[in-house]
Amino acid sequence: MEGEVLSNRYEIEECIGEGGMALVYKAKDRLLHRRVAVKVLRDQYASDADFVERFRREAQAAASLSHPNVVNIYDVGEVANTHYIVMEYVRGINLKELIRKEGKLGPSQSVDIALQVAAALGHAHRNRLVHRDIKPHNILITEDGRVKVTDFGIARAVSSATLTQTGLVIGSVHYFSPEQARGGLTTDQSDLYSLGIVLYEMLTGQVPFTGETPIAVALQQLQDPVPSPRKLDPSIPKALENVIIRALAKEPRDRFASADQFIIALQKTGVATGGAIDWYEGEVTDVTEDWDLATRRVARTSAEEATRVHGLEREEKVTKKREGPSPKRRRARTFLFLFVIAFLGGLFWAISYLPQLIFPAEVSVPDIGGFTVVEARIALEKQGLKLAVDKEVEDPEVPAGRVIRQDPLAHRRVKEGRTVWVIVSRGPKLNLVPDVVGMHLDDAKEAIRQAGLVVGMETPVFEPSVLRDYIVSQSPKPGTFLEAGLAVDLMVSQEDTGRPLVVLPDLRGESLEDAKARVRRLGLTIGNIWGEVHRSLPAWEVTAQNPAPGAKVPQNSAVDFVYNSWGTGQPAQRPPEGVFNGQVDGGDTAGTNEDEVAGATTSDMKEASVQITIPPGPEQEVVVVVIDALGAREVYRGKHAGETTITRHVRGYGKDPKIQVYIDNFKVSEKGFPD
């Protein structure tokens, strides 16, 4: 969608994120001249009324929230069946990326982040919204450390049904509450449970419950006790561990009753740096209830008691007036004195430092190209400048984590305090090495090219159990990652390379005895000999050979012949079709006329019909291999559509011949010939 303009206003610039339902793009608001984030529903869901409704509900739910720790929603629209939401563009990284980068966070930083997330949840819960998918991926950290909670797409009004839909569980299984895992009622305490797991992961670098499958993780959420975070890191304060254990109670009634209680418990640990949510303290439910209770107690005082109290106060004032200034007046004088001192101090500071703030000094931007982010930040701070990462891109020349470009450029003069934006390298693009072992050489080459890699050395190896030109092994191993454009070396099954190779001449047209003598002089041996009837050819003339003329074979290899037995008094013995001169089963041998074949004996030959059903799906390749006295040979290869059935007639020679069937390089059957 890059370059498109939605509603003649939002110009799409680049994709910055992907989710299960939508893609997120950075865009420019042409009307207000600001950067925004545009979440666009995926095309495959645009025609699904249920998904479209959930997408709209995300906008309606999040737009009703207005809080410093919640990503703002600016606009909602639809253009040509493209549904989108315009949101606040947050510069920074999500919490999951921060944890991966740092390994784990310190208690102070973890508590500060948890406090801000709890503040956002408290605001949402007071607006009767449950998030249902609190996880590090949905928690953004701005460059100045502010936390922003995003993706209220699966939140819904508490007043409506919040049971998990039939067979559908919304959220991420590692951060599920037990009631979400069992498909039960989702409440405010479900969000607090998920926040407890996020806090656990920040402090330890790992989630408390893991497993090989989502079901295994969900069962642990339901049954297993929470592993102690202090066993993983003894430096975690005991009070903070107690908060986590309570937040991760299996039953909602045993957890914190509200986000406000969660905040109070975190503040009481004494770990927070202070000031993370100072503005939020007026919203804490417990404090408000205490104030209301005190107000109600005064309101219940009778009129007579109130009069008596006021009379006493007047008498006390008269008495104190005689004795000297009242405490109230002394406090007023003290306040006035302090105010004058503060005013004079502020005036002195303004006179001394305000010009420097209004007219900061100019400094030279250092050249930080090739620096790590930490090194670049230190170099900039020495000059009174700040660093911010604009984006990370793949670069084959610059190592991962180092600066590629900077803005402003090096050696430019800028005001002190200016932010320098940098582009950081992710390193070279890495491609997954495909598994080509067992593939034909041509198919293996194509798979390697499609993976963005190149074919390296092709080393011939002798492997009796692998067909010729099939891959025996590869380097690097499949499943590893390799830079784009690097080579994958292949070991290809060939003839026995331990013996000298002989180029086989064309023996067709020679007499059988001359051909046999010539083969022996080449260091080869005589293999099987079959007779065929050709009335138009001389007796004993060689009509076919195996291997074919021009083939390279190791010394001491056997050569099979077919000769014309007409007029020799010898019985005709039909050789296996398709093994001479490169023919497949069913092809004619050189010079053979089916109408001229007569009297063939088949005492050493067996025939069979192979019926093959292609599985459902796209077109697939079928290969039939016969293993008999002649060795292993391919007698059929062809591509067929899915859910079709083909039948092939094959022949085998010698004792106990076998038939193997391969579909897309996987062996699906192996059986012998019928007696």
Image (cartoon, rainbow, N blue to C red):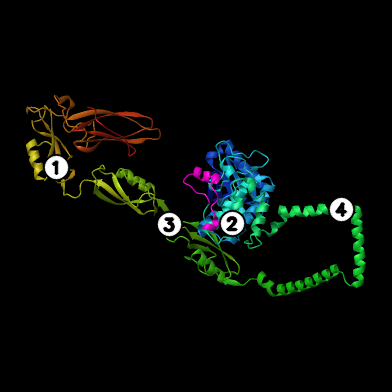
Q: Which residue is mark 2?
A: 241
The residues tagged by marks 4 and 2 sit, at their Cα atoms, a distance apart of 44 Å
Q: Position of residue 278 (x, y in %)?
A: 68, 60
Which amino acid is tagged 2? Glu
Q: Tell which of 599 and 126 is nearer to you.
A: 126
Seen at 64% across and 62% down, the residue is: 270
Q: Is residue 271 found left or right of 437 in the rendered image?
A: right
Q: Residues within 10 Å of mark 2 (few under 14, many from 20)?
A: some
The residues tagged by marks 4 and 1 sit, at their Cα atoms, a distance apart of 122 Å
Q: Earlier in the sequence, mark 4 or mark 1?
A: 4
Q: Secondary structure at mark 2?
A: helix
The residues tagged by marks 2 and 3 sit, at their Cα atoms, a distance apart of 41 Å
Task: Determine whether label 4 and label 2 are within 8 Å by CB.
Answer: no
Q: Secondary structure at mark 3?
A: loop
Q: Tell which of 154 and 12 is nearer to you.
A: 154
Which amino acid is tagged 3? Pro
Q: Which residue is mark 1?
A: 505
Q: Is residue 434 found left or right of 266 in the rendered image?
A: left
Q: Answer whether residue 667 is visible to the viewer in this image.
A: yes
Q: Is residue 263 above or below residue 585?
A: below
Q: Is residue 597 found left or right of 189 in the rendered image?
A: left
Q: Which residue is mark 4?
A: 301
Q: Residues within 10 Å of mark 1 (few under 14, many from 20)?
A: some
Span of residues in magenta: 208-231
Position of the C terminus, as image quadrant, is: top left
Q: Is residue 562 found left or right of 237 in the rendered image?
A: left
Q: Which residue is mark 3?
A: 428
